[in-house]
Image: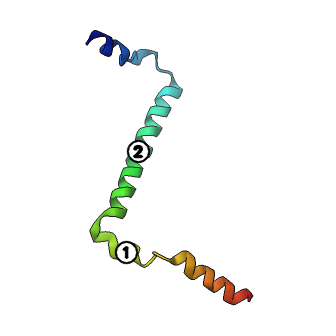
Amino acid sequence: MNKISQHFHTDWDKLTGFDWTGIVMVLVISALMLTAYLWVWLPSNKNKFEQYRDFVLKDGMKEKKKHG
């Protein structure tokens, strides 16, 4: 058990500003990604996102009609 605790030991006093910036960025981005995934996958939001299901195809058809 002592080897495991030594392996995961962190000396918080020796972290630089870049280390802290990286930690904060990882935590913020992870929270935003989790929020986005949960927001999209909630069944109550299905109708909001269903209207955008094939917007790429619809926009592509509009472009073809204009140019062609």
What residue is at 67 percent from the left and 89 percent from the top?
Answer: 65
Name the residue carrying label 1. 48
How many callouts does the rendering have? Answer: 2
Q: Amino acid at mark 1?
A: Lys
From this view, report whether residue 37 is shown above or below residue 3: below
In which quadrant of the rendered image does the C terminus lie? Answer: bottom right
Q: What colour-coding does the image apply?
A: rainbow
Q: Residue at x 33, y 63 (%)?
A: 41
- Say if 54 sits above or below 2 in the image: below
For label 2, the crowd category at 10 Å Cα-Cα, with few meaning under 14, some 14 to 19 and many 20 or more, is few
Q: Amino acid at mark 2?
A: Ser
Quadrant location, the N terminus: top left
Q: Which residue is situated farthest in the top direction here?
A: 2
- Which of the 4 quarters of the picture holds residue 39? bottom left
Report the front residue among 43 and 31. Answer: 43
Residue 1 falls left or right of residue 11: left
- Compared to residue 56, the image places residue 21 above or below, namely above
Q: Residue at x 36, y 19 (%)?
A: 8
SS of the residue under disc 1: helix
Disc marking residue 39: none
Q: Which residue is mark 2?
A: 30
Q: At 47% from the left edge and 39% from the top edge, which residue is drawn?
A: 25
What distance separates the C-alpha of mark 1 from that of mark 2? 24 Å
Mark 1: few, some, or many residues within 10 Å (few <14, many ≥20)? few
SS label for mark 2:
helix
Of the numbered discs 1 and 2, the one sitting upstream in the chain is: 2
Q: Are marks 1 and 2 in contact (CB under 8 Å)?
A: no
Residue 11 image point, x, y percent = 40, 15
